[in-house]
Structures are given as structure tokens and as C-alpha cells.
């Protein structure tokens, strides 16, 4: 039940496609404007820092690394600290790529924390706004240059574990904060974001795709 609900945050997270001056309910034109801006990038590369503060622990769990989002392929989540690990977060699968380059497919139940994260990131960077208004009350602040989005669950089932989601950014998504009803909070901050027209050969290899043949 918990994993199923978390997965729905993905549609939720499409949140990032909205903005309007002042704090007010989301407007279709504002959603379209921010969605077009955030979703215009075929590939996004960024560095991230993630912090998860659990209600039962005094200190947060932190990690850092790099993210690669490719519209057609999914998300590469490359953790560099405190331990190195590479994950491919696809629509319905997760793969771990070892230092030897060997791919190990992982069942979603084996990595319950990464499964919803992958869906959230795909929805955010892909600017999929379709289910946002259906599942959340949305409040927007700022404009296309600097926007903040606050999401509050409409449905009782979702509200049982999720208190709210906050997303902020401009041309790119810059920060995500997910607050759970039980008191746990996950924060992700992105920096040095840049766009590209296509993944690199190395990124394609990690995604499990063949690099395009080089013309003689």
C-alpha cells in the first residue's frame, strides 16, 4: 500500500510545471508555461545532494552524486558519497550497474526507496502535468524565472503518509522536499544543471542502450 501510494507521487511531482505571481491556486496558463520550460530539455545533467531526516534519528542520512535525465530512457542516479553506486531508474524497472559494468536487474520491492524516487524524478524533469490537479491542491509563488510549488494531497489515502511536496526552480528543477505524515523529510538539491540534445556514449551504455554507429 505504501509503495503504491508513493509511486503516485510521480504524477504528483509533475508539480514542477506551474507558476504564477504571488501565492494562489494553479492556473492552466501558468502550468503550461512552466511545464514547457522545464520539459524542453531532452537531457538534463546535474549534481545532487540528498538528505533524509527520519523522525526516529537525530542525524540525517546524506548522500551526493550526479543525475542524468534522458526523456526517452529514464534517470541515471549516480551516488558518489558516502559509497559509490549507479542505478538506472526506468518506468517499471530498476537496474544496478556495478564497477565491472555488469547490470543487475532489481525488483522494485528490493529498493522501495528508489522506486518512487525514480517516478518522481521522471515526472518532474519530464514536466508531465496531467495528474497534478487531480491529486493535489497546488499553490504557486513567483514566476517562470523563479518559481515555488506547494502540493497538498486531495485524497485521504495519499494524505495518510504524505503531508506535502514542495518543488522550486527556474529553468531547471532546483529543489524537492517531500514531507511524510510520520515526520520523515527528504530533501534533494540540484546544482550545476545543464541541458543537452542527447546522452553521451557512456550514458547510453549505463542505460543499456547501444551507442549510435560512428560513420567512417
Image (spheres, rainbow, N blue to C red):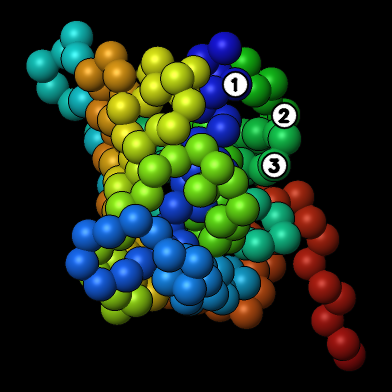
Proximity of marks 2 and 1: CB atoms separated by less than 8 Å: no
Q: Quadrant of the C terminus?
A: bottom right
Q: Which mark is residue 172?
A: none
Q: Say whether residue 131 is left or right of residue 174.
A: right
Q: Residue at x 62, y 62 (%)?
A: 70
Q: Is residue 50 visible?
A: no
Element type at mark 2:
strand
Q: Residues within 10 Å of mark 2 (few under 14, many from 20)?
A: few
Mark 2 — residue?
105
Q: Is residue 1 above or below residue 176?
A: above
Mark 1 — residue?
4
User: Which tag, 2 or 1, sits closer to the chain's start?
Assistant: 1
Q: Nearer the viewer, mark 2 or mark 1?
A: 1
User: Which tag, 2 or 3, sits closer to the chain's start?
Assistant: 3
Q: Residues within 10 Å of mark 1 (few under 14, many from 20)?
A: few
Q: At which x and y percent is residue 26?
A: 39, 59
Q: At which x and y percent is residue 119?
A: 57, 41
Q: Nearer the viewer, residue 214 or 203?
A: 203
As measured in the structure, the alpha-carbon distance from the residue carrying label 2 to the one carrying label 3 is: 13 Å
Amino acid at each position: 500500500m505504501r509503495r503504491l501510494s508513493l509511486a503516485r507521487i510521480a504524477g504528483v511531482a509533475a508539480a514542477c510545471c506551474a507558476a504564477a505571481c504571488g501565492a494562489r491556486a494553479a492556473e492552466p496558463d501558468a502550468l503550461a508555461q512552466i511545464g514547457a520550460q522545464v520539459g524542453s530539455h531532452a537531457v538534463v545533467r546535474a549534481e545532487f545532494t540528498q538528505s533524509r531526516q527520519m523522525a526516529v534519528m537525530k542525524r540525517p542520512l546524506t548522500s551526493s552524486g550526479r543525475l542524468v535525465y534522458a526523456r526517452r530512457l529514464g534517470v541515471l542516479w549516480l551516488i558518489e558519497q558516502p559509497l559509490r553506486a549507479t542505478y538506472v531508474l526506468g518506468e517499471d524497472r530498476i537496474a544496478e550497474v556495478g564497477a565491472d559494468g555488469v547490470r543487475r536487474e532489481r525488483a522494485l520491492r528490493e529498493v522501495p526507496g528508489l522506486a518512487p524516487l525514480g517516478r518522481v524524478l521522471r515526472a518532474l524533469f519530464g514536466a508531465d502535468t496531467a495528474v497534478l490537479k487531480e491529486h493535489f491542491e497546488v499553490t504557486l509563488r513567483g514566476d517562470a524565472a523563479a518559481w515555488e510549488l506547494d502540493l497538498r494531497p486531495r485524497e485521504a489515502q495519499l494524505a495518510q503518509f504524505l503531508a506535502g511536496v514542495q518543488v522550486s526552480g527556474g529553468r531547471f528543477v532546483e529543489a524537492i522536499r517531500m514531507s511524510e505524515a510520520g515526520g520523515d523529510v527528504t530533501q534533494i538539491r540540484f546544482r550545476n544543471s545543464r541541458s543537452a540534445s542527447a546522452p553521451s556514449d557512456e550514458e547510453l551504455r549505463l542505460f543499456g542502450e547501444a551507442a549510435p554507429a560512428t560513420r567512417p
